[in-house]
């Protein structure tokens, strides 16, 4: 009788547990789906100051079956790690930012990336600036490396105290009218030097980039041939222009990213910075005493160019190319590019953002409440499509070294020839 009673109790308990399990079975399955085998986990490698972490969390909230792990690194480390992983065929993320100066480095490994045209990327092509989109295509135009993120349209930052003391206008539109070509830029530089004793620009690099960033072809052509030693190469013209500004005393010795440069920005030790939109964030954080004293206007059209910006690519190693593309398409939509602009200063590559109310009514307290965005938007439409080449960064560093040597007293022509010789050796290795 005791055995029978025990058996009944055990059967009752089993029935109760089965019923409980049946009632909660759906919840358990959902948990497994949300954090188990059915979850899509995407690794996303980024660099620089972005708001992509917060946007990734927003995406996760609306897509509970997706987890996005954002890994941030310094620009150089980021691209070296990415190149190493795709070369080895293992360890690459599902998505990765690629900076525009680095993009051509990866063209030789095109097969290591997903062709976004195969995923239907042409459906969003009309959302972006043509030159920005086209730069991410392969040679035949049938392959797309990545979707456009931000861009770096250049404008002219000018210090109002320096301009005023030099007898120059301080209204951005009047400055744009007065300095509309390279000759007028040089005239203004001479006036600044005569009246204030200060240089017009901060460094040889900026003087060089005035023309360099506007070149459609610079160090290499699209066939990968080195152009720098050829007669009539326009890089030499950009080099000579920087040397000319230096010889006239228009160039300072404030190398970008150094403490001395930040201090010069802070105190207005030079008149003009020819730089992209992303410099605003650096100035706000590192030159607080300059608040209210800097303004932005357009550059002479000959100096119109792009400096910086990126793409989001999908390495072929991923198991989730469709999910990765869906996320990147959402992340880089015009609406989210507006968020990235207002939250992190990433300048939009989607021109429809330039018409959005929050963009049109944007004001920068650091720049005296000026709406600087409209000047960068105007510049963005004038930027040519350029080709950098796979070893652009390496080659460019050699020219910058030569210019630095010239500033220290070396002969310009000898430095140019020596730099070309070093470059030819580096490229032919």
Image: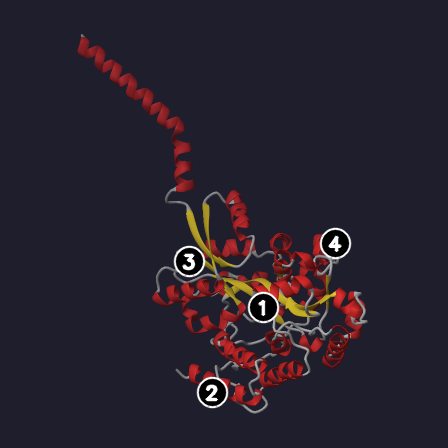
SS at circle 3: loop
Answer yes or no: do the residues labelled 1 and 4 have beta carbons within 8 Å? no
Pick out the residue farthest to the bottom. 231
Q: How far apart in space, not on screen, are marks 1 and 3 (Cα)?
A: 32 Å
Q: Which residue is mark 2?
A: 421
Q: Distance between the Cα atoms at labels 1 and 2?
A: 26 Å
User: Which mark's residue is nearer the viewer, 3 or 4?
Assistant: 4
Q: Is residue 323 visible?
A: yes
404 to the left or right of 370: left
Helix, strand, or loop for circle 2?
helix
In the depicted view, which residue is nearer to us: 276 or 367?
A: 367
Residue 126: tell me if it is visible. no
Q: Which residue is mark 4?
A: 361
**Where residue 335 sits: x, y (%)?**
63, 53
Report how many numbered discs are placed on residues in the image.
Answer: 4
Would you name the residue on which mark 1 appears?
Answer: 256
Of the numbered discs 3 and 4, the one sitting upstream in the chain is 3
275 up-or-down from 19: above or below: below
């Amino acid at each position: 009788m005791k055995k029978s009673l025990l058996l009944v109790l055990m059967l009752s308990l089993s029935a109760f547990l089965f019923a409980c399990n049946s009632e909660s079975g759906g919840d358990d399955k959902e948990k497994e789906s949300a954090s188990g085998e059915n979850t899509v986990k995407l690794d996303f490698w980024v660099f620089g100051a972005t708001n992509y972490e917060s946007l990734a969390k927003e995406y996760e909230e609306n897509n509970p079956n997706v987890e996005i792990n954002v890994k941030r690194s310094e620009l150089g480390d980021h691209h070296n790690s990415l190149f190493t992983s795709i070369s080895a065929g293992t360890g690459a993320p599902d998505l990765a930012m690629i900076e525009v100066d680095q993009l051509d480095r990866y063209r030789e490994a095109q097969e290591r990336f997903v062709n976004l045209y195969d995923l239907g990327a042409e459906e969003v092509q009309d959302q972006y600036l043509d030159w920005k989109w086209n730069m991410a295509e392969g040679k035949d135009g049938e392959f797309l490396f990545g979707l456009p993120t931000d861009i770096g349209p250049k404008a002219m930052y000018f210090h109002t105290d320096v301009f005023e003391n030099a007898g120059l206008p301080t209204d951005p539109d009047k400055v744009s009218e007065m300095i509309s070509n390279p000759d007028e830029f040089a005239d203004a530089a001479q006036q600044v030097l005569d009246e204030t004793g200060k240089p017009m620009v901060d460094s040889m690099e900026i003087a060089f980039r005035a023309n360099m960033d506007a070149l459609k072809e610079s160090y290499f052509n699209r066939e990968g041939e080195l152009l720098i030693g050829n007669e009539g190469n326009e890089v030499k013209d950009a080099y000579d222009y920087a040397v000319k500004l230096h010889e006239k005393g228009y160039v300072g010795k404030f190398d970008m990213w150094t403490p001395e440069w930040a201090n010069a920005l802070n105190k207005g030790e030079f008149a003009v910075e020819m730089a992209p939109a992303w410099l605003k964030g650096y100035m706000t954080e590192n030159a607080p005493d300059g608040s209210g004293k800097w303004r932005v206007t357009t550059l002479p059209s000959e100096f119109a160019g792009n400096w910086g910006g990126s793409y989001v690519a999908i390495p072929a190693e991923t198991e989730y190319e469709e999910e990765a593309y869906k996320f990147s398409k959402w992340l880089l939509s015009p609406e989210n590019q507006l968020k990235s602009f207002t939250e992190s200063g990433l300048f939009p590559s989607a021109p429809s953002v330039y018409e959005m109310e929050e963009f049109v009514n944007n004001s920068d307290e650091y720049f005296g409440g000026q709406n600087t965005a409209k000047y960068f938007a105007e510049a963005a439409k004038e930027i040519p499509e350029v080709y950098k080449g796979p070893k652009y960064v390496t080659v460019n560093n050699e020219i910058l070294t030569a210019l630095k040597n010239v500033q220290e007293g070396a002969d310009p022509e000898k430095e140019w020839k020596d730099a070309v010789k070093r470059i030819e050796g580096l490229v032919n290795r």
